[in-house]
Image: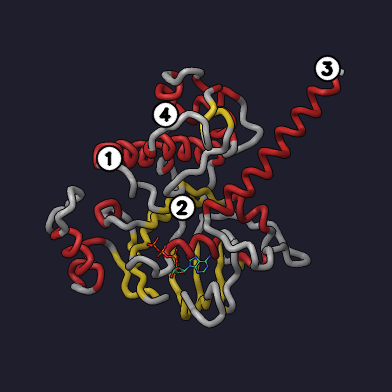
Amino acid sequence: IFQLSLPLNFLGTIYRELRQNLLDMEVLFNLQTEHAPIKDKPGAQPLVLKGGAIRFENVNFGYHPDRLIFRDLSFTIPAGKKVAIVGPSGCGKSTVFRLLYRFYDPSSGRILIDDQEIHETQLESLRRSIGVVPQDTPLFHSDIMHNVRYGRLDATDEEVKEAAMKASVHNTVLSLPEGYSTTVGERGLMISGGEKQRLAIARVLLKNPPILFFDEATSALDTHTETELMRSINTTLLDRARTSIFIAHRLRTVVEADLIIVMKEGQVAEQGTHEELLRLGGLYHDMWIQQASDNSPERIPEP
Ligand code: ATP
């Protein structure tokens, strides 16, 4: 009985985990459950990654047909570059990610990765290629080892620890009551926002995707933690040619991006580097001045 119950327990754990992950993904991306689930088209081909160039071509999309979020939205994210998407709250920054990950399909227009329409590719191969560090990392009610391993389910304990070391969270984990066996998540041990995000980085490191999304990855942190976190992101995740997209509120974190895409009312208002956009004197310039004159402790310097 003992021998039989072990694999059954194991299967039970896997099943519960997968189910929980699915639920968490829904919570994570604030999904509506009513819309028809996205499925592979008959004859869909696996996505073949070359450099990870992303192109939106005349994309129209609304969560509801009577309220368009994107109107003929077009932009290109070059392969291997660090790109920031900024714009007023509600302009659709997170929606860019939701369409790219195919939680939703556009009503018209095309989205391409390395010249392949994502609509025509196998969903599994698409999602395997994209990693995300969300603003508020959901932790499953499970131990830390499982929580990080979610990045790649067949990773060994050693690989999990190595990823945690690179994400600068290994020593913190060791200082917890039960180390990697400490239960976190709902009703588990509370850990800080910064630690959660480091665990998210460790997860993504295990997954090692060619395309990476940071959704407001640093918004809830104090300045010191943010600097630390950006450093570990820069030294670990950005250590090789990888297309990385930052959805940012605070412009200070996007100054060094290769390209900044400024969105407004469902379209690209302007794009360029930080210096180019400041010189342009448009929306980005105004947002920069606005944030610089903000009285919050998160002040950014005058241009
Ligand atoms: P923020 O900077 O505040 O995070 P954002 O630019 O990322 O915003 P999105 O989250 O992409 O904006 O949302 C764009 C618009 O779509 C918003 O007006 C939002 O209210 C709406 N929206 C987002 N998710 C849904 C949904 N699941 N159902 C209906 N409307 C939605």
Q: For the residues carrying marks 4 and 2, which lies nearer the camera in this image? A: 4
Label 3 is placed on what type of residue? Phe
Which of the two discs, 3 and 4, labels the residue nearer the N terminus?
Answer: 3
Total marks drawn? 4
Amino acid type of the residue tagged 1 in the rendering: Thr
**Residue located at (41% from left, 22% from top):** 171
Sequence-first tag of 4 and 2: 4
- Is residue 197 visible in this depiction of the protein? yes
Q: Position of residue 218 (x, y in %)?
A: 34, 47
Which quadrant holds residue 114?
Answer: bottom right
Quadrant (top left, top right, bottom left, bottom right) of the N terminus:
top right
Q: Earlier in the sequence, mark 2 or mark 3?
A: 3
Using the image, tell me which numbered label, if any, was put on residue 213. Answer: 2
Of the residues under marks 4 and 1, which one precedes in the sequence?
Answer: 4
Residue occupying image coordinates x 28% and y 55%: 250
* Residue occupying image coordinates x 62% and y 26%: 156
Query: Does the residue at mark 3 contact the one at mark 4 (Cβ under 8 Å)?
Result: no
Q: Amino acid at mark 2?
A: Phe
Dot 4 corresponds to which residue?
169
> Where's the C terminus, which quadrant?
bottom left
Q: Can the viewer see residue 116?
A: no
Q: Position of residue 110 (x, y in %)?
A: 57, 73
What's the residue at 50%, 26% (across, down)? 162
Query: Along the line of sight, which residue is nearer the eye, 164 or 14?
Result: 14
What residue would you read off at disc 3?
Answer: 2
Quickly name the residue at label 1: 227
Q: Check disc 2: other Cα within 10 Å, few if <14, some if 14-19, many if 20+.
A: many
Tell me which label, 1 or 3, sits earlier in the chain: 3
